[in-house]
């Protein structure tokens, strides 16, 4: 019995030990390393796939909504995702940081007009940038927000927001 325990303990030590000189290939680590255009491609890694298709998806008050006009722009200080159709105009201010990560939406340029009625109060609003190619000026990410009007109980709730490969 002792022999079996010694063998098991030895096997655990062998398989759990990692060599100090083992290094992870920066082109296969899943991170956006210095010089890469997106995680594990571009720079010193193989080129990134150039088959980008821009898309926008979101739900407004639980209903999938499409837009005739949509864009991502950089004002020199703030990133603004704008979308509109014949009933609603929305601007979401992603603030000044275009880095990959999760953030709170800025109130500065965020606004919503629904059938010409302004919903100026932004709540429960956040976003994440999941891809940012600064060489080809493309960005992807996720967002959600809630706009309301002071003195009223109605809200415009944006959920499941996703934008992919938007050129700015």
Image: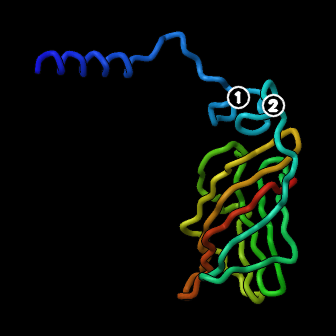
Which is nearer the N-term, disc 2 or disc 1? 1
From this viewpoint, which residue is outermost toward the top? 21
Q: Nearer the viewer, residue 160 or 45?
A: 45
Name the residue located 76 percent from the left edge and 45 percent from the top edge: 132
Element assignment for label 2: loop
Name the residue located 65 percent from the left edge and 59 percent from the top edge: 142
Q: Residues within 10 Å of mark 2 (few under 14, many from 20)?
A: few
As drawn, 148 above or below 16? below
Q: Label 1, on which residue? A: 27
Q: How many marks?
A: 2
Name the residue located 79 percent from the left edge and 36 percent from the top edge: 37
Percent position of residue 108, x then y: 70, 61
Any part of residue 163 in sight: yes
Are the residues flagged by discs 2 and 1 in contact, CB closer than 8 Å? yes
As drawn, is 30 to the left or to the right of 11?
Answer: right
Percent position of residue 53, x then y: 84, 59
């Amino acid at each position: 019995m002792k022999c079996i325990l010694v063998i098991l303990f030895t096997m655990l030590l062998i398989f759990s030990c990692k060599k100090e000189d083992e290094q992870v290939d920066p082109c296969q680590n899943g991170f956006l390393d210095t010089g890469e255009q997106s995680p594990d491609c571009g720079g010193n890694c193989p080129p990134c796939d150039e088959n980008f298709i821009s898309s926008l998806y979101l739900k407004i008050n639980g209903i999938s909504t499409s837009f005739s006009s949509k864009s991502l722009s950089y004002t020199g200080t703030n990133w603004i995702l704008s979308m509109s159709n014949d009933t609603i105009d929305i601007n979401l201010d992603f603030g000044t940081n275009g880095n990959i990560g999760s953030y709170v939406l800025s109130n500065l340029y965020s606004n919503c007009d629904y059938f010409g009625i302004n919903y100026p109060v932004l709540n429960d609003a956040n976003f994440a940038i999941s891809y940012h190619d600064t060489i080809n000026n493309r960005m992807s990410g996720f967002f959600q927000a809630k706009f309301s009007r002071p003195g009223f109980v109605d809200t415009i709730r944006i959920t499941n927001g996703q934008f992919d490969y938007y050129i700015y």
